[in-house]
Image (spheres, grey):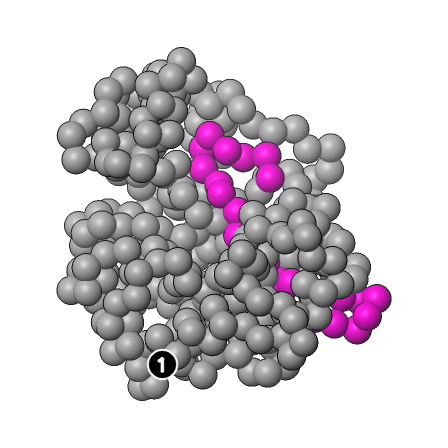
């Protein structure tokens, strides 16, 4: 697994990261993290709302801390911003993981009731207090990110370095058009999640929802409805054509989808989610597929998807 800079910062991260770690059992989470680390992944994304697992305490041990990039999210609904800027959520995360700091703390969704200046000052305070090295945004609009940067420069505060954004074959506009402009203007990078579109691109859904799949679980009715919708059926038809390309390349459909995300040089890292070790190793195998994505293959994929966003500028020149 090769490394890339996170935006224009000096922080180097593996091109693949492991997210949703603590939604697994203690034993499985430890196996997944160890396997990821042994295969060159140094980026581990945690979040306050994920269940706490004791295996994290052992994995994020001081002996290997310097070689890891650990990120977490704070949710404004759980955040108390008042005199003294007390951050119970972030402090609780650090205590749970027995860490002095995280490398990047993400502000998940902007708070519409908090002035941007207060948000930027709060995140700067977190960094100045040594609880994080950098801060980023998650699910912010380009306009909101630009405002945060402008406010930071105006008041001599620290701007965000990265946006966490959903990116996959069926959702492209933000990462392929909007974020490149921010990268070239203010250096904000992209850390993307859901490369398989919540499992839709896994190939397991063929106009139906198999038992024990994610879409069959309680709380995922929205995913089931999405898969069984007219748009969902059109997506499944496209995936059948993409499956043929994957077979020609000697890879699986998930590997093709993840490699397709990685071929975007504007993406610093793609966060993976895995429920078992076999699935994780399959996903990591996307690294071997990346060199096979020639311009002709990419053009063929774009023709099948039919959703390549239009950009007025080519920032590669």
Quarter of the view holding residue 115: bottom right
The residue under the point 24% across, 20% down is: 208
Q: Residue furthest bottom?
A: 63
Q: Nearer the viewer, residue 274 or 220?
A: 220
| Residue 191 locus on image (x, y percent) | 51, 54
Q: Is residue 111 visible?
A: yes
Write down the residue under mark 1: 98
Taking depth in this image into account, of 313 and 130 the one nearest to the observer is 130
Q: For residue 155: magenta?
A: yes
Boundaries of the magenta span: 152-174
Q: Is residue 291 magenta?
A: no
Relative to 12, 274 lies left or right: left
Q: Quadrant of residue 174?
A: top right
* Image coords of residue 223 (percent x, y): 35, 30
Left or right: residue 217 compared with residue 298: left
Residue plotted at (38% across, 17% down):
229
Is residue 281 placed above or below 55 in the rendered structure? Answer: above
Category of crowding for the residue at label 1, using alpha-carbon neighbours closer than 10 angstroms: few (below 14), some (14–19), many (at least 20): some
Picture coordinates of residue 46, whole percent (x, y): 39, 63
Looking at the image, residue 96 lies above or below residue 100? above
Residue at 15% of width from left, 30% of height from top? 211
Q: What quarter of the picture does the N terminus occupy? A: bottom left
- Residue depicted at 46% across the width and 55% down the height: 269
State whether residue 288 appears in this view: no
Q: Nearer the viewer, residue 251 or 141?
A: 141
Q: Nearer the viewer, residue 176 or 301?
A: 176
Q: Quick one: which residue is furthest to the right in this view?
A: 154
Which residue in the rendered view is the most extreme toward the top? 230
Q: Is residue 227 left or right of residue 151?
A: left
The spot of residue 295 in percent (x, y) is: 49, 34
Q: Is residue 46 above or below residue 310?
A: below
User: Secondary structure under badge 1?
Assistant: loop
């Amino acid at each position: 697994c090769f490394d890339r800079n996170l935006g224009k910062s000096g922080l180097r991260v593996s091109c693949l990261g492991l997210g949703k770690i603590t939604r697994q059992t203690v034993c499985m989470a430890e196996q997944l993290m160890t396997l990821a680390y042994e295969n060159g992944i140094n980026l581990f994304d945690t979040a306050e709302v994920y269940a706490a697992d004791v295996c994290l305490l052992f994995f994020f041990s001081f002996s290997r801390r310097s070689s890891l990039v650990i990120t977490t999210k704070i949710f404004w609904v759980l955040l108390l911003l008042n005199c003294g800027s007390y951050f119970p959520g972030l402090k609780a995360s650090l205590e749970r993981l027995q860490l002095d700091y995280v490398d990047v703390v993400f502000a998940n969704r902007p708070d519409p009731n908090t002035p941007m200046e207060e948000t930027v000052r709060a995140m700067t305070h977190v960094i100045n207090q040594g609880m994080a090295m950098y801060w980023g945004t998650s699910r912010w609009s380009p306009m909101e990110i630009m405002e945060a940067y402008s406010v930071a420069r105006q008041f001599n505060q620290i701007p965000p370095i990265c946006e966490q954004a959903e990116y996959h074959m069926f959702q492209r506009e933000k990462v392929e058009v909007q974020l490149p402009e921010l990268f070239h203007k203010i250096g904000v990078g992209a850390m993307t999640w859901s490369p398989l579109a919540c499992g839709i691109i896994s190939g397991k859904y063929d106009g139906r929802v198999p038992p024990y799949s994610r879409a069959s679980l309680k709380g995922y009715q929205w995913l089931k409805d999405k898969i069984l919708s007219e748009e969902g059926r059109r997506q499944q038809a496209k995936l059948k054509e993409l499956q043929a390309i994957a077979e020609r390349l000697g890879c699986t459909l998930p590997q093709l989808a993840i490699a397709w995300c990685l071929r975007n040089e504007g993406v610093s890292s793609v966060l993976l989610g895995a429920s078992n070790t076999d699935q994780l190793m399959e996903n990591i195998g996307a690294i071997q597929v990346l060199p096979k994505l020639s311009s002709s293959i990419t053009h063929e994929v774009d023709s099948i998807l039919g959703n390549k966003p239009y950009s007025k500028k080519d920032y590669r020149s």
